[in-house]
Image (spheres, coloured by chain):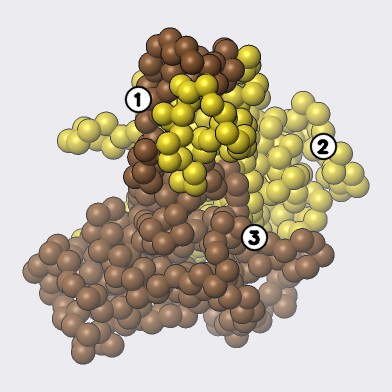
Chain colours: A brown, B yellow
Amino acid sequence: MVNEEQLGRRNILRQAGLAIGGTVAAGALSACGNDKVEVEKIVEVPPSGPQPSQFPYAQHVAAGYQLNVAAVKEAAYQAYYAGGCCHGAYSALLGHLAGTVGQPFNLLPIDFGKFGGGGVAGYGSICGAALGGALLINMVVADPAAPAPAVRNPMIAELLRWYEGFAFPAYSPTAVNAAETGLVKDFSAANLVNLQRKPASHLCHASVSGWCAQVGVAANGKDKAARCARLTADVAGKVAELLNDYLANRALTPTARDAASATCVVCHPAASTTQPVNSGMACVTCHTDKVSGHP
Amino acid sequence: MVNEEQLGRRNILRQAGLAIGGTVAAGALSACGNDKVEVEKIVEVPPSGPQPSQFPYAQHVAAGYQLNVAAVKEAAYQAYYAGGCCHGAYSALLGHLAGTVGQPFNLLPIDFGKFGGGGVAGYGSICGAALGGALLINMVVADPAAPAPAVRNPMIAELLRWYEGFAFPAYSPTAVNAAETGLVKDFSAANLVNLQRKPASHLCHASVSGWCAQVGVAANGKDKAARCARLTADVAGKVAELLNDYLANRALTPTARDAASATCVVCHPAASTTQPVNSGMACVTCHTDKVSGHP
């Protein structure tokens, strides 16, 4: 008898003369119907079923499936303290899909997102939580056949645009993480509204610096971490909602560009041959010198 | 007889009463040594050996292995035209590792990087080629046990810092891609030096806009594509070099921050509680209003 547990992540297949996967195999299959057992070999056999190469993974998700947004948020908040913002969002979403959908999500490394914290390796670039979320959207979403419009990239762009205009942090954890000791600010649910700020940028350093300056804390302290842990939950939750809409065939309604940036691209369209710009980002958050006195 | 080809990526295992991976298995193994064959089933069995979950993947790379930098560059240039900058770098590096190392690289989806083009879904954020390269560094590099200093994130940060100061494009393809018809500018090897510019930013929209404005072409035209295809090769080649150094145990020598940015963080350290900044990016590329007249 072989039960399901034995046929799990790392199957140990004990079988006379049969090794699967490129080591020893000559004569093995024909020997299987034979009554002659020569030698016992132990080989590791990964499970059959959906594999990581069978991408994108929406094809492996059952009709009607929806992610549990609340569970994803709490997992993301907690995981922030185990590996940063990108790990928080990435591992919470991947872990949830691994636990509820199974393969191929449970065949992928749960720690893959740790590089993305602090705007990719601490460089202050794209917010790691947003990047972790984008990686999961990319993993799941299958674009329809052309000429139907693309779905995946507009969904990722929507995540970044939504991020710019969302008042972070909004999430209040079910269980406050043990790392949150000695905070200067009051992160209770009742007071959180007084600690919120719309970053107007999806870049880590702009998002973090703007919030820290408003609240009056350091960019490398525990209050910043408490903010980013909750932001990670907010972002992972938004990704779960976007994926749920996609999986339920609800159409995406893109958020419009902010008014100031919309005027910038009138004079700086991508097709210009003098000063073209091809970007979805908010412009004047960084280009503050163009707000006034600019032709 | 079962040959190696049959035991490759998608093994078809024909066997009496035996299905591996959670479907039908009861009594199967004990029946294998029996002379009674009841019914033939066909099941797909993924190969044994290194799996995607066994991360990071340096552990699966043989001692002395080095990537072929020239091959990676040419593949990245060509792949740009099949799916953009992130796909170009990602697929060239992954494909090269899949072809030369094998598992688990050849068990991963080669098209995973297509979302990253144009600074992540066309949003103008981190250069997709740099992101694709960062994903591969993250995939391979194993940090030593603490308290030894980390290796992976400094390597990714170095890639972004190097990008800021490199005069793109530098690569001249072995075979010019068929898509390169009707270019306005001369991309021949002899003239390439006249089309080069250091982006001073790893962000797509800044890198592209600055180059297009200098050269005098649109940000959505064929000359921009020709530039970004060569840039993709340059970035993928740099990643291959960084990985080769790592695999050969050659220590990383980080590129110093530009002088202007180095002065910014004197007054804006991460530990400040007024206007802290935690970033490795060049500052004044975007914050041009802080270059003069700033306290």
Q: Position of residue A49 (x, y in %)?
A: 53, 46
Question: Residue sitting at 47 percent across and 12 percent down?
Answer: A36
Chain to which mark 2 belongs: B
Quadrant into which the N terminus of chain B falls:
top right
Q: Position of residue B214 (x, y in %)?
A: 70, 53
Label 2 CA crowd tier, 10 Å (few <14, some 14–19, many 20+): some
Say which mark, if any, is on residue A23. Answer: none
Tell me whether marks 2 and 3 sit on the same chain: no
Q: Vertically, is B35 above or below A119?
A: above
Disc number lying in front (3 or 1): 3
- The kind of residue on which mark 3 rests is Ala
Question: Residue sitting at 29 percent across and 70 percent down?
Answer: A74
Chain to which mark 3 belongs: A
Tell me whether marks 2 and 1 sit on the same chain: yes
Depth order, front residue of B192/A148: A148
Task: Tell me if residue B289 can be seen.
Answer: no
For this view, does B114 lie left or right of residue A49? right
For this view, does A248 lie left or right of residue A4? right
For this view, does A75 lie left or right of residue A256? left
Circle 2: element type: loop
Question: Residue sitting at 46 percent across and 46 percent down?
Answer: B22
Circle 1: element type: loop
Q: Where is residue B261 in the image (x, y as percent from the top left)?
A: 39, 53
Contact between labelled residues 1 and 2, with CB atoms less than 8 Å apart? no
Say which mark, if any, is on residue B251. Answer: 1
Location of residue A117 by image quarter: bottom left
Tell me whether marks 3 and 1 sit on the same chain: no
Query: Which residue is farthest front?
Result: B36
Task: Tell me if residue A162 can be seen.
Answer: yes
Residue that numbered label 3 is attached to: A142
- The kind of residue on which mark 1 rests is Ala
